[in-house]
Amino acid sequence: MNDIENLQKKFENFMNENDSYQFYLKTKILLPKFVKKNSEEKIFVFLDFVISHLISVNDNESALNLLELSLSLFEKYHSNINEKENFVKNYHNLYKKFPIKNCDKSRFKINFLIFCEKNKINENLFEKEKIFYDFANDAIENFHYIMGYRFAMKIKNIEFLEKEIEYLKKDELFKISEIEIFYFISRACLEFLINKDTKIANDFIVKFIDKDLNKNHPILNFAFLLVKLLEIKEISFENFKKFVDFYQKFIDKDKKLKSYLDQISKNYFQKNLYFNNPFANFNFFNMIRMFSGGNS
């Protein structure tokens, strides 16, 4: 009988008695020693066993606590991840066991991504496993709008952005005005343009534009026409600046738009429009750190 089978045997009484709290406490006590002395493969088999049981008895909070604890234990006892692809895949499989709604997995997502950054786990593995897709969907369905937005932008998923915008319109807690929604849409469009994704920017913004431009809020027209302007390869910086100046009074109402426009100017024309490169040394993982409330 191996280590995992021995542990499972010890937990059988708690499982039969449906005492999830005792099951959780027992696991929490034994997990550090188990992680320290066993291989990554055995650790994930054991995690699958305990987390699956806790979820089956609707103790999602305890299951999440163990999932987060396992990350810190990996950092302590397995600083060098041997099979990075399997590591990402195994954690993703554990994550998918949890229900999408009414189960706040935000803290785990943040800690997982920070852990992966520290251990130099390539983002391509997340894309291969569609982790950002699941993270975005989970965040939006649980009304974590900022995190949902960031993950949706990361994977350039227009469907998720549309869903988030619809939720924002209906949200009774935040009570976001229609004009604020228009600025939200415009910022998303400009973020695509920062990366020179003019096709995606166009596919996104046309969903919110009336063919009769007079019926649109000016900031939506600005975003739409900016996409069309930047599709012209021969456009000059001077014409770009004139166009921005025409809409300046609407742009001034949102500081982020000015930052985005400055970066667009730098990426397309190698010139700053307002500031000195506000996005220097800023990447997706730096943004994720902001959610953690620290720089660790």
Image (cartoon, helix red, strand yellow):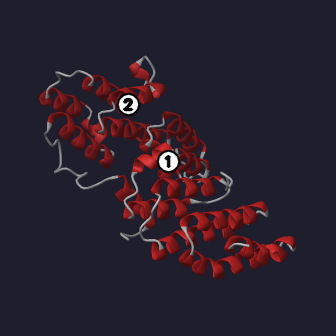
Instruction: Identify residue for label 2.
Output: 201
Q: Is residue 19 visible?
A: no
Q: Is residue 158 left or right of residue 252?
A: right
Q: Nearer the viewer, residue 283 or 170?
A: 283
Picture residue at 13% right of the left edge, 40% below the top = 271
> Which sits earlier in the primary sequence, circle 2 or circle 1?
1
Q: Residues within 10 Å of mark 1 (few under 14, many from 20)?
A: many
In the displayed structure, 283 sits above or below 167; it is: below
> Above or below — where is 122 with respect to 54?
above
Residue 70 quadrant: bottom right
| x, y percent for residue 171 | 59, 47
* Residue where numbered disc 1 is placed: 132
Q: Position of residue 195 (x, y in %)?
A: 30, 38
- Label 2 Cα neighbours within 10 Å, binned few <14 / some 14-19 / many ≥20: many
Image-quadrant location for residue 226: top left
Q: Between residues 125 and 101, which one lies in front from this camera angle?
A: 125
Q: Amino acid under label 2?
A: Ala
Q: Is residue 105 left or right of residue 23?
A: left
For the point 53% across and 34% down, the residue is: 159
Secondary structure under tag 1 reads helix
